[in-house]
Amino acid sequence: MSDVTLALAVLFPILLLLGVPIYAALGITGLVVTWLTNVPLVFATQSILNGLDNFPLLAIPAFILAGNLMESGGITNDIIRIFRRSFGHVHGSLGIVTILSCMFFAAISGSGPGTVAAIGAIMIPAMIRQGYPAPYSAAVSATGGTLGVLIPPSNPMIIYAIIANVSVTDLFAAGMLPGLIVGLTLAAVAYFAARRSGAVVTQVQDEQEQDSVASLMWQGKWALAMPPIVLGGIYTGLFTPVEASVVAVAYALVVSLVVYRSMTWEGFNRAFEGAVLMGGALMIVVACSTLFARTITLERIPQELVELFSLISSEPLVILLLINILLLIIGTFMETISAIIILAPILVPLVRNFGIDPIHFGIILIINIEIAFLTPPLGVNLFVGSQIAGVSIEKVFRAILPFIAALIGLLALITLVPGLSLLIPSLLR
């Protein structure tokens, strides 16, 4: 191991242990390695600028803004009302409603924590009022929020597609069937967990929820039409993912301001402020992570990893098993976007060398990220859910364990059956 590789392996973990923000740890490590390799420092600035100079990145803040506008404009309430009316007669129905609402919201926002914040802010207090344990209420919302990165459009998918040089549209299509399977499985887990805890049938409190499901669907037609318009436009080639993100923003604005007339000036400001802060934070992470990833490439670490794994096994399934174990461990302490930008340049050449489709691997990587959202010490969804519910992370984590077990089982299934990821992209080509 060279001195430079040793610096990479030692400096970054030490900075994290010292509590340095991850973007700063990535940037500092990248600069130090650039200096040690006697590469001109202009390499660092070029790496950062090249990392940000990707047109598809424009879709990320726009999808975040569209999700924020849905929440501020009250569009999310219609979605939840429809699902509550549909499943209110089922024991533990609010857990199912939370998961299904997260699935629907995920088809717009592209963000895991954003989905938890939008749906959890409504559903967690409602579940607690109905007698559900607070840790369970937070656990369901935190778990449902993970669907924000698997069901397209997805911000992490956009980042991965740029790095792996694959089609964003194909990757979005690949996430549809796994997203549906994962969402329905999590809803089933929520149902059985609620029955085991003796949850009662939800009492309908909203007068509008007394209407029939068909009537509520008609009232919520503008909310229900949003994902088909955005995703349908992408898959039919009517517009690109970036253009789709702008369409989503325009649609959410028009519906909130003109149709619902529910958008306040305060809500409007809050939606834009949230999008700017989250989008800006992501871009800083992207910039610093790109520099770090370039230094890894300079040290030929991807090539060395290919050689190492080739010595271990020549079977693609064994390689994927080892990668899944690695990703599950790394996901506990590394931020999502950073993990993708750092690991994708290393792992994509590896999986391609073993004949694994990078689209399929992208979905595997995203599901690992879903699990990482729920595992301490850096489980972002775990933190958001516990803060909304006002309970400790330890209690929420205990309640979330059945959902994590289900996600690990689904990760194994999708790893073993590539057709689940590749069927829809192949049909759309």
Image (cartoon, grey):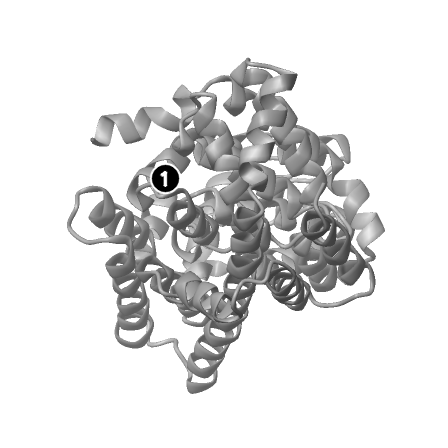
Instruction: Name the outermost residue toward the front.
Output: 38
Looking at this view, is 288 or 337 the one in front? 288
Identify the residue shown where x is 38% and y is 44%.
213
- Percent from the top left, x then y, of residue 224? 32, 51
Q: Is residue 253 above or below residue 25?
A: below
Q: Residue furthest bottom?
A: 265
Left or right of 5, for residue 294: left
Image position, residue 74 (x, y; %): 43, 67
Of residue 113 and residue 194, the one placed in the foreground of this image is 113
Viewer-side residue, 264 vs 92: 264
**Residue 133 seen:** no
Q: Quadrant of the C terminus?
A: top left
Residue at the disc numbered 1: 171
Residue in the image at 51% along x and 62% along y: 286
Q: Does any portion of residue 172 appear in the rendered image?
A: yes
| Horizontal side of residue 390 vs 381, given as left or right | right
